[in-house]
Amino acid sequence: MSDNFSVDKYLIAHKKLIESLDAISFDNAIQIISKTISANKKIITCGNGGSASTASHYITDWNKMYNIYCGKKLRGISLCDNIGLITAYANDISYDEVFSGQLKPLLDDEDLVIGISGSGNSKNVINAIEYANNNNANSLAIVGYDGGELISTAKHCLHIPTFDMQLCEDVHLMFGHMVMKYICNTKIENN
Protein backbone atom coordinates (compact mmCIF):
# COMPACT_ATOMS: atom_id res chain seq x y z
CA MET A 1 0.00 0.00 0.00
CA SER A 2 1.15 3.49 -0.90
CA ASP A 3 2.23 5.99 1.77
CA ASN A 4 0.11 8.59 -0.06
CA PHE A 5 -3.20 6.73 0.13
CA SER A 6 -5.23 5.46 3.02
CA VAL A 7 -8.95 4.97 3.43
CA ASP A 8 -8.90 7.38 6.36
CA LYS A 9 -7.19 10.09 4.28
CA TYR A 10 -9.70 9.61 1.45
CA LEU A 11 -12.68 9.87 3.80
CA ILE A 12 -11.21 12.93 5.52
CA ALA A 13 -10.65 14.60 2.13
CA HIS A 14 -14.26 13.79 1.21
CA LYS A 15 -15.54 15.24 4.47
CA LYS A 16 -13.60 18.48 3.94
CA LEU A 17 -14.87 18.78 0.38
CA ILE A 18 -18.48 18.11 1.39
CA GLU A 19 -18.25 20.73 4.14
CA SER A 20 -17.00 23.31 1.60
CA LEU A 21 -19.84 22.81 -0.89
CA ASP A 22 -22.54 25.41 -1.47
CA ALA A 23 -25.91 23.71 -0.90
CA ILE A 24 -27.71 26.57 -2.68
CA SER A 25 -25.89 25.82 -5.94
CA PHE A 26 -27.01 22.18 -5.65
CA ASP A 27 -30.60 23.28 -4.99
CA ASN A 28 -30.49 25.63 -7.98
CA ALA A 29 -29.25 22.88 -10.31
CA ILE A 30 -31.90 20.48 -9.00
CA GLN A 31 -34.60 23.10 -9.65
CA ILE A 32 -33.43 23.58 -13.25
CA ILE A 33 -33.79 19.84 -13.83
CA SER A 34 -37.12 19.64 -12.03
CA LYS A 35 -38.58 22.51 -14.08
CA THR A 36 -37.43 20.83 -17.29
CA ILE A 37 -39.22 17.63 -16.27
CA SER A 38 -42.38 19.56 -15.33
CA ALA A 39 -42.37 21.24 -18.74
CA ASN A 40 -42.15 17.81 -20.43
CA LYS A 41 -38.90 18.78 -22.13
CA LYS A 42 -35.98 16.42 -22.73
CA ILE A 43 -32.97 16.16 -20.45
CA ILE A 44 -29.90 15.15 -22.45
CA THR A 45 -26.59 14.27 -20.76
CA CYS A 46 -23.04 13.83 -22.00
CA GLY A 47 -19.49 13.38 -20.71
CA ASN A 48 -16.28 11.42 -21.26
CA GLY A 49 -14.74 8.55 -19.29
CA GLY A 50 -16.06 8.49 -15.73
CA SER A 51 -18.30 11.43 -16.63
CA ALA A 52 -19.82 9.36 -19.46
CA SER A 53 -20.70 6.71 -16.93
CA THR A 54 -22.19 9.38 -14.66
CA ALA A 55 -24.18 10.85 -17.58
CA SER A 56 -25.61 7.40 -18.27
CA HIS A 57 -26.22 6.74 -14.57
CA TYR A 58 -28.19 9.98 -14.21
CA ILE A 59 -30.57 9.03 -17.01
CA THR A 60 -30.90 5.43 -15.82
CA ASP A 61 -31.88 6.50 -12.29
CA TRP A 62 -34.07 9.42 -13.28
CA ASN A 63 -36.04 7.67 -16.05
CA LYS A 64 -36.68 4.50 -14.06
CA MET A 65 -37.30 5.91 -10.60
CA TYR A 66 -39.42 8.87 -11.70
CA ASN A 67 -41.73 6.50 -13.55
CA ILE A 68 -41.89 4.06 -10.63
CA TYR A 69 -42.48 6.68 -7.91
CA CYS A 70 -44.55 9.21 -9.84
CA GLY A 71 -46.13 7.11 -12.59
CA LYS A 72 -44.99 9.71 -15.13
CA LYS A 73 -42.53 9.81 -17.99
CA LEU A 74 -39.20 11.56 -17.81
CA ARG A 75 -37.75 12.25 -21.23
CA GLY A 76 -34.09 11.56 -20.47
CA ILE A 77 -31.40 10.59 -22.97
CA SER A 78 -27.67 10.00 -22.49
CA LEU A 79 -25.58 10.76 -25.58
CA CYS A 80 -22.96 8.36 -24.19
CA ASP A 81 -25.01 5.20 -24.62
CA ASN A 82 -25.00 4.56 -28.39
CA ILE A 83 -21.49 3.38 -29.20
CA GLY A 84 -22.38 3.09 -32.88
CA LEU A 85 -23.30 6.77 -33.12
CA ILE A 86 -20.34 7.87 -31.03
CA THR A 87 -17.84 5.99 -33.18
CA ALA A 88 -19.55 7.03 -36.42
CA TYR A 89 -19.23 10.72 -35.53
CA ALA A 90 -15.70 10.22 -34.20
CA ASN A 91 -14.56 8.34 -37.30
CA ASP A 92 -16.43 10.24 -40.01
CA ILE A 93 -16.38 13.78 -38.62
CA SER A 94 -14.44 14.35 -35.37
CA TYR A 95 -14.44 13.18 -31.78
CA ASP A 96 -15.08 16.82 -30.89
CA GLU A 97 -18.51 16.47 -32.56
CA VAL A 98 -19.72 13.17 -31.03
CA PHE A 99 -22.25 14.94 -28.79
CA SER A 100 -23.17 18.08 -30.77
CA GLY A 101 -23.67 15.91 -33.86
CA GLN A 102 -26.14 13.74 -31.98
CA LEU A 103 -27.99 16.83 -30.75
CA LYS A 104 -28.73 18.16 -34.25
CA PRO A 105 -31.64 15.78 -35.01
CA LEU A 106 -32.66 15.42 -31.36
CA LEU A 107 -32.67 18.78 -29.59
CA ASP A 108 -35.88 20.80 -29.29
CA ASP A 109 -36.51 24.28 -27.89
CA GLU A 110 -36.21 24.46 -24.10
CA ASP A 111 -34.68 20.99 -23.72
CA LEU A 112 -31.87 20.83 -21.16
CA VAL A 113 -28.38 19.63 -22.09
CA ILE A 114 -26.25 18.62 -19.10
CA GLY A 115 -22.51 18.46 -19.77
CA ILE A 116 -20.42 16.65 -17.16
CA SER A 117 -16.65 17.16 -17.03
CA GLY A 118 -14.18 16.97 -14.18
CA SER A 119 -11.82 19.49 -15.80
CA GLY A 120 -14.49 21.50 -17.58
CA ASN A 121 -12.34 21.45 -20.72
CA SER A 122 -13.66 18.50 -22.74
CA LYS A 123 -14.06 19.94 -26.25
CA ASN A 124 -16.90 17.61 -27.25
CA VAL A 125 -18.87 18.55 -24.12
CA ILE A 126 -18.18 22.27 -24.69
CA ASN A 127 -19.42 21.89 -28.29
CA ALA A 128 -22.64 20.23 -27.08
CA ILE A 129 -23.27 23.03 -24.57
CA GLU A 130 -22.57 25.69 -27.19
CA TYR A 131 -24.93 23.93 -29.61
CA ALA A 132 -27.67 23.90 -26.96
CA ASN A 133 -27.11 27.58 -26.16
CA ASN A 134 -27.29 28.53 -29.84
CA ASN A 135 -30.45 26.52 -30.50
CA ASN A 136 -32.98 27.76 -27.95
CA ALA A 137 -32.19 25.09 -25.37
CA ASN A 138 -31.01 25.34 -21.77
CA SER A 139 -27.62 24.15 -20.53
CA LEU A 140 -26.15 23.00 -17.24
CA ALA A 141 -22.49 22.18 -16.67
CA ILE A 142 -21.49 19.85 -13.84
CA VAL A 143 -17.75 20.49 -13.37
CA GLY A 144 -14.82 20.20 -11.01
CA TYR A 145 -11.29 21.64 -10.91
CA ASP A 146 -11.52 25.39 -11.64
CA GLY A 147 -14.53 24.84 -13.90
CA GLY A 148 -12.50 25.11 -17.09
CA GLU A 149 -14.16 26.58 -20.17
CA LEU A 150 -17.53 25.01 -19.36
CA ILE A 151 -18.10 27.12 -16.25
CA SER A 152 -18.49 30.23 -18.41
CA THR A 153 -19.99 28.51 -21.49
CA ALA A 154 -23.06 26.90 -19.90
CA LYS A 155 -26.06 28.98 -18.91
CA HIS A 156 -26.00 27.31 -15.47
CA CYS A 157 -23.24 25.53 -13.58
CA LEU A 158 -22.70 23.27 -10.59
CA HIS A 159 -19.04 23.53 -9.63
CA ILE A 160 -17.30 21.07 -7.31
CA PRO A 161 -14.14 22.95 -6.27
CA THR A 162 -11.51 20.21 -6.14
CA PHE A 163 -8.60 19.22 -8.34
CA ASP A 164 -8.90 15.60 -7.17
CA MET A 165 -10.70 13.85 -10.04
CA GLN A 166 -11.96 10.97 -7.92
CA LEU A 167 -13.48 13.23 -5.28
CA CYS A 168 -15.00 15.37 -8.02
CA GLU A 169 -16.54 12.35 -9.77
CA ASP A 170 -17.85 11.01 -6.44
CA VAL A 171 -19.73 14.26 -5.79
CA HIS A 172 -21.00 14.43 -9.38
CA LEU A 173 -22.55 11.00 -8.86
CA MET A 174 -23.98 12.10 -5.49
CA PHE A 175 -25.65 15.01 -7.25
CA GLY A 176 -27.46 12.60 -9.57
CA HIS A 177 -28.76 10.71 -6.57
CA MET A 178 -29.90 13.98 -4.97
CA VAL A 179 -31.86 14.81 -8.12
CA MET A 180 -33.47 11.37 -8.11
CA LYS A 181 -34.51 11.70 -4.46
CA TYR A 182 -35.90 15.19 -5.06
CA ILE A 183 -37.93 14.44 -8.19
CA CYS A 184 -39.28 11.24 -6.62
CA ASN A 185 -39.80 12.83 -3.19
CA THR A 186 -38.07 9.89 -1.46
CA LYS A 187 -36.86 9.81 2.11
CA ILE A 188 -33.25 10.02 3.19
CA GLU A 189 -32.37 7.29 5.69
CA ASN A 190 -30.28 8.42 8.66
CA ASN A 191 -28.79 5.31 10.21
Image: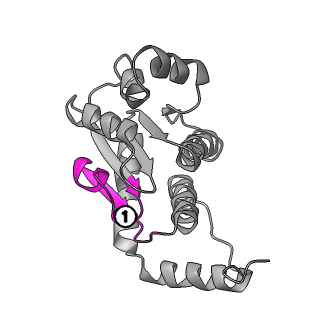
Q: Is residue 174 left or right of residue 19?
A: right
Q: What are the residue bounds of the magenta stretch? A: 142-163
| Residue 121 against residue 104 in the figure, above or below | below
Q: Which quadrant of the rendered structure holds the C terminus?
A: bottom right
> Within 10 Å of the Cα at label 1, are there few (<14), some (14-19), or many (20+) other Cα atoms?
many
Q: Is residue 111 visible?
A: no
- Residue plotted at (58% across, 49% down): 50
- Residue plotted at (34% across, 67% down): 25
- The type of residue carrying mark 1 is His
- Residue plotted at (40% across, 65% down): 145
- Residue plotted at (58% across, 44% down): 66
Q: Is residue 78 left or right of residue 139?
A: right
**Judging from the image, what secondary structure is the residue with disc 1 in?**
strand
Q: State the image quarter where residue 14 is shown.
A: bottom right
List x then y, in percent, for residue 58: 56, 46
Return the residue at label 1: 159
> Does the magenta run of residues contain 148?
yes
| Residue 93 against residue 41 in the figure, above or below | above
List x then y, in percent, for residue 122: 39, 44
Return the residue nearer the eye: 97 or 73.
97
Q: Is residue 183 visible?
A: yes
List x then y, in percent, for residue 128: 34, 34
- The furthest residue to the right: 1
Return the residue nearer the eye: 11 or 29.
11
